[in-house]
Amino acid sequence: MSVIRQLSSRTVYENRWLVVREDRVRRDDGSEGIYSVLSKPDFAVVIPLDGDQLTLVEQYRYPIGRRLWEFPQGSWEDEPDADPAALAAGELAEETGLRAGTLRHLGFLWEASGYATQGGHVFLATDLRQGERTVHREEQDLRPGRFAVAEFEAMIRRGEIRDGPTVAAWGLYLVHGRAPTGSSGGSQ
């Protein structure tokens, strides 16, 4: 098993959303190099499923210069150790106004393990009821939309949905057999 050993580490950039550090490392063969690591709080991604309808949000993603349809998702920079279920419920309400009667944890996925420490908890939200949205200033252009499951999957096939956490979350849901929350109970 190959192990890369950290020799030293220094923060090269930091703001309220992230930290970038540069590590000097030594590989098993004795060679040395650097490794850049991006640290961000873990996030939650929520699959809001109401019968055969999914709720997604569309928003402008500045780094890629385009709007994307994606499942509600996010992190709380001011509360990086927030309970994942509370984070999921909060992001769902903020971005869509939906409240979930049942929130089922499907798993955890690393966002970009080649350069980042951030990962995401995937939740299935069912027994949905509509409430008020509380969108943050940074998300003021966000707009929710409802799609039939068949249309959502067709959008993935056509390349219209390219958000990695959304596609990965849907894959995790499919691995779980498209099972409704049923007997597994409420929040986990």
Image (tube, rainbow, N blue to C red):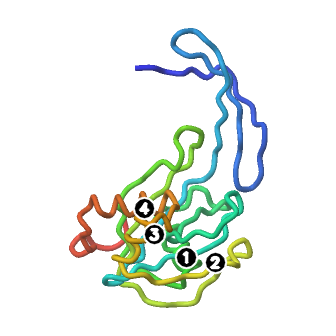
Instruction: Kindly check if marks 4 and 3 are in contact, taking CB atoms under 8 A apart as contact.
Output: no
Q: Nearer the viewer, residue 68 or 134?
A: 68
Q: Kindly indicate whether the residue at mark 1 contacts the one at mark 2 (C-beta within 8 angstroms).
A: yes
Give me the disc on residue 57.
Answer: 1
Label 2, label 4: how far apart the Cα atoms are: 20 Å
- Answer with the quarter of the image where residue 81 lies: bottom right
Q: Which quadrant, please, contains the C terminus?
A: bottom left
Amino acid bearing label 1: Val
The residues bearing labels 2 and 1 have C-alpha atoms spaced at a distance of 6 Å
Q: Are marks 1 and 3 in contact (CB under 8 Å)?
A: no
Alpha-carbon neighbours of circle 2 within 10 Å: few (<14), some, or many (≥20)? some
- The answer to whether the residue labelled 2 contacts the one labelled 3, judged by CB atoms less than 8 Å apart, is no
Residue tagged 3: 46
Mark 4: which secondary structure?
A: strand
What is the residue that sits farthest to the top in this orientation?
30
Q: Percent position (x, y) of residue 89?
A: 49, 74
Q: CA distance from mark 1 to mark 4?
A: 16 Å
Label 2 is placed on what type of residue? Leu
**Which quarter of the rendering shows the N terminus?**
top left
Q: Position of residue 94 (x, y in %)?
A: 59, 78
Query: Circle 2 is placed at which residue position?
Result: 142
